[in-house]
Amino acid sequence: MNTTAPESDQRTSRTDQAADSGSQARSLYRPVHDRMLAGVASGIARYVGVDVLLVRIALVVLVFVGGIGLPLYLASWVLIPEEGTDQSILAEFMSRMQGWRD
């Protein structure tokens, strides 16, 4: 008895699975765990789907070649929200300043 589905059914189910995984909205955040400093490299790695070591190496290379790595890291730290929060550090600061101003 043959328990495998016909080849056309297998292709359809793989296509449906790929479409389902692609339709899930990925969000960029800085994870609470698996971080060295602020979790920027870990968050970017998870979002892009690459190894965190590659992102860390790229950031270090950018620090020494052109000097954009450190400002990029700091901007990402301020702009990417931490896991479990809705707002980034900058957005939270701006809302506090708006509340203080009013």
Image: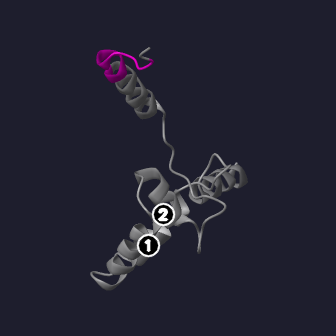
Q: Residue at x 55, y 53 (%)?
A: 29
Q: Residue at x 41, y 20 (%)?
A: 4
Residue identifier under label 2? 76
Image quarter hosting the N terminus: top left
User: What is the x, y in percent for residue 98?
Assistant: 65, 51
**Magenta range:** 3-11
Mark 1 residue crowding within 10 angstroms, few (<14) / some (14–19) / many (20+): some
Residue identifier under label 1? 56
User: What is the x, y in percent for residue 97?
Assistant: 66, 56
Judge from the rendering whether residue 90 lies leftward or rightward of residue 25; answer left or right. Answer: right
Between disc 1 and disc 2, whose residue precedes? Answer: 1
Q: Nearer the viewer, residue 5 or 73?
A: 5
In the structure shown, which secondary structural element does the residue marked by tag 2 occupy?
A: helix
Judge from the rendering whether residue 61 lies leftward or rightward of residue 24; answer left or right. Answer: left
Q: Quadrant of residue 23?
A: top left
User: What is the x, y in percent for residue 78?
Assistant: 54, 63
Q: Residue at x 64, y 53 (%)?
A: 83
Callouts 1 and 2 close, C-beta under 8 Å: no
